[in-house]
Amino acid sequence: MIRRRVTVLGSTGSVGSSTLDLMARAEETGTGAFEVEALTGGANIARLVEQARQWKPRIAVTADPARLNELRDALAGTGVEAAAGDEAVVEAAARPADWIMASIVGSAGLRSAWAAAANGGVLALANKESLVCCGPALMQRVRAAGGRLIPVDSEHSAIFQVFPADAPHQVEKLILTASGGPFRQTPLERMRAVTPREAVAHPNWSMGAKISVDSATMANKGLEMIEAAYLFGMPAERIDVVVHPESIIHSLVEYVDGSTLAQMGPPDMRTPIACALAWPERIAWPAPKLDLAALGKLTFEAPDETRFPALSLARQALTEGGAAPAIFNAANEVAAWAFLDGRLGFLNIAAVVAETLDRSTREGLAFGSGDACASALSVDAQARRIAEGVVSTLAIAA
């Protein structure tokens, strides 16, 4: 039986809710027993209250300070402490736990993931931005505390499961798979008129709006390339991306002897979550089963970097190193939300990223010598300022 003292950062989101659902199934089947230290959420107070009443954490936190009284009143008599605000989220992340799910979306999740990394337990990381912005420092912080980082992204979970951690020299390269998103076969001219509603309609995965836009532009694969480099110590030139529309093979590891190992399964985020929750064990849950005969065939193609320039921009940022990956992330996040808000055209998302990287270089934007998290957040804020200026310029030109 798996026993864990758990904190879930971002418990009301898709990944956080799925984590709690898997824990409940494990308890129902007698394969897991969980004590919950902390749950944190955003504006969905009703869901956070429901989760807190079910799991009885020591503390429940909303990131919105204006909702504290609402949360406190709803939890009256439960014995669950209520707190609110960004600092309260960071404090919750620092509380002692064996296993912490870090699933707060965007750069907002960086400070809490950084705090959780010093706990000495398992950090199950679903927040791309934490690794992209300060990956080497974050991983060193986990190691220094005697903990372990397990990736929850389906692609990195796939690599994690087939990567020889004790013999990385045996690996020739990593191959990340991409669905290609909703515009895989859309002509470039048609992509100029893409709407937010079209962009968030992913053919395989059910995800939030911003992540769906990242998939549509393939910026998500660029971010994942950067993550993979940090997670597995692999240079940019030894990380490939292949488009695999069926999303059955989640990533591959090619070995020096010519062998290639892949992790396969239907596209369901609960699978990598379950892997991280139980590792090195496995827990049974009603997972969708892979029927290769029914699938008939799996297809692959090279990504079109003319229509999806975010890939080459991410590789450029990774090769440049330093603050460039953090700048790429900040600019992409600003541009993606500007597109969702109707302030920016779809093809201009990559244009904002490219121009922000260029202007940041000219301005000498770089990490400072102090705390890595604080330095990353400073670069993030400055890059966002630059990106917002680029968005305004493009919006006026349009």
Image: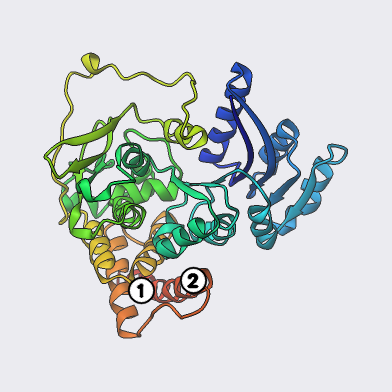
Residue 34 position, x and y percent, is 65, 32
In the rendered structure, the answer to whether residue 329 lies left or right of residue 283 reads: left
| Extreme-top residue of the structure | 293
Q: CA distance from mark 2 to mark 1?
A: 27 Å
Residue 372 is marked as: 2
**Front residue (pair 51, 309):** 51
| Extreme-left residue of the structure | 258
What amino acid type is highlighted by mark number 2?
A: Ala
Quadrant of the snapshot with the N terminus? top right
| Extreme-front residue of the structure | 166
In contact (CB < 8 Å): disc 2 and disc 1: no
User: Residue at 32% of width from left, 59% of height from top?
Assistant: 345
Q: Which of the two labelled residues, at mark 2 and mark 1, occupies the earlier sequence position?
A: 2
| Extreme-bottom residue of the structure | 363
Residue 200 position, x and y percent, is 38, 43
In the rendered structure, the answer to whether residue 148 lies left or right of residue 355 reads: right
Disc 1, SS? helix
* Figure quadrant of residue 222: bottom left
Q: Quick check: can you spot residue 102? A: no
Local crowd size for mark 2, using a 10 Å CA cut-off: few (<14), some (14–19), many (≥20): some
Residue 280 position, x and y percent, is 46, 34
Residue 376 higher or lower than 10, as above or below: below
Residue 390 is marked as: 1
* Figure quadrant of residue 207: top left
**Front residue (pair 288, 134):** 134
Q: Quick check: can you spot residue 177? A: yes
User: Residue at 46% of width from left, 80% of height from top?
Assistant: 369
What amino acid type is highlighted by mark number 1?
A: Val
Local crowd size for mark 1, using a 10 Å CA cut-off: few (<14), some (14–19), many (≥20): many
Disc 2, SS? helix
Residue 63 position, x and y percent, is 66, 55
